[in-house]
Image (spheres, coloured by chain):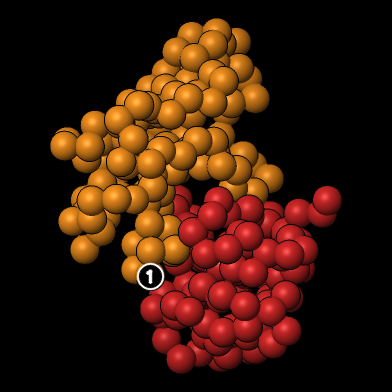
Amino acid sequence: GAGVSQTPSNKVTEKGKYVELRCDPISGHTALYWYRQSLGQGPEFLIYFQGTGAADDSGLPNDRFFAVRPEGSVSTLKIQRTERGDSAVYLCASSLIGGSPLHFGNGTRLTVT
Amino acid sequence: AQTVTQSQPEMSVQEAETVTLSCTYDTSESDYYLFWYKQPPSRQMILVIRQEAYKQQNATENRFSVNFQKAAKSFSLKISDSQLGDAAMYFCAFPGGSGYALNFGKGTSLLVTP
C-alpha cells in the first residue's frame, strides 16, 4: 500500500510568511509524529498525535508552530511568521499505534529566505 | 534527561567487509526499545533494526545485527558483507518524553567503497 506522503516536497518562503506542511499517513495508522531535521543533525521531535488529539506537543519550539489532525488522518503543520532559523527538513511519520515502529515520509524541505 | 550519542560522524568500509557503528544512551528506565534507522539521500528514514531492552539476545536482521550492552548503555550496529546500497546516514534512536517520541543521535555517515 501507499506509504506516508508529505507535500510539498520543497517549499521556499520569505521571512515573516505563513506556511502549511501536509502529511498523509498510512491508512489505518492512528499515531502520527512530526520531526524537524536541521542540516547535519538527527531528527528532532516536535509533536505526536494519537487519533485527533495531540498526545505530546513538548517538542514544539514556540507558539509560532502549531499542528492539527482534525479527522485523525491527514495532519497539517503550520508555521506563522517564519524565520530563517526555521529552515530545515520537516519529517512526518505514522505508526499503527503509539509505540509501534514508525514509517516515515520523504519530508518537506523548508527554506526561509 | 534521556540522550543518545553517536561519536562517529563518518565511517568508511569496503564492499563485502564488516563495519560497526557506535551508539551510547542515557536513561533511568529499565524497559525500553532501541532503534537504528537508515536515511539515504531520498531523506526517508528506514527502520533497520530494533532491540528490546529486556531481551538479552542481540537482535539480528539479515546482514544487520546489534551488540547491546545494557549495563554499559551501549547499542552498536554491525553491518556484515557491506554493499554499495548501505551507504547512507545511520541514526540511533531511543524513546523519550511521552515514551513514543524518539530521540535521535546526530548520525553517522557511512561510505561504502568498491
Residue A96 visible? The answer is: yes
- The percent coordinates of residue A79 (x first, y second) are 58, 85
Q: Residue at x 82, y 54 (%)?
A: A2
Instruction: Please count the marks in the image.
Output: 1
The quadrant where residue B5 appears:
top left
The quadrant where residue B53 appears:
top left
Q: Chain of mark 1?
A: B
Most foreground residue, B114 or A47: A47
- The percent coordinates of residue B25 (x first, y second) are 26, 46
Type of amino acid under label 1 = Ser
- The percent coordinates of residue A54 (x first, y second) are 52, 82
- The percent coordinates of residue A45 (x first, y second) are 45, 66
Horizontal side of A70 relative to A16 (left or right) equals right
Q: Residue at x 56, y 42 (%)?
A: B47
Q: Residue at x 49, y 14 (%)?
A: B80
Residue beneath disc 1:
B98
Most foreground residue, A37 or B48: B48
Q: Residue at x 48, y 9 (%)?
A: B17
Residue A85 visible? The answer is: no
In what quadrant of the picture does the N terminus of chain B appear? bottom left
Crowd band around label 1 with a 10 angstrom C-alpha radius: few (<14), some (14–19), many (20+):
some
Horizontal side of B60 relative to A95 (left or right) equals left
Which secondary structure, mark 1?
loop
Taking the view exactly as shown, the residue that stands out farthest to the front is B55
Which color has been applied to chain B in this rendered view?
orange
User: B32 above or below A22?
Assistant: above
In what quadrant of the picture does the C terminus of chain B appear? top right
Which color has been applied to chain A in this rendered view?
red
User: A17 above or below A21?
Assistant: below
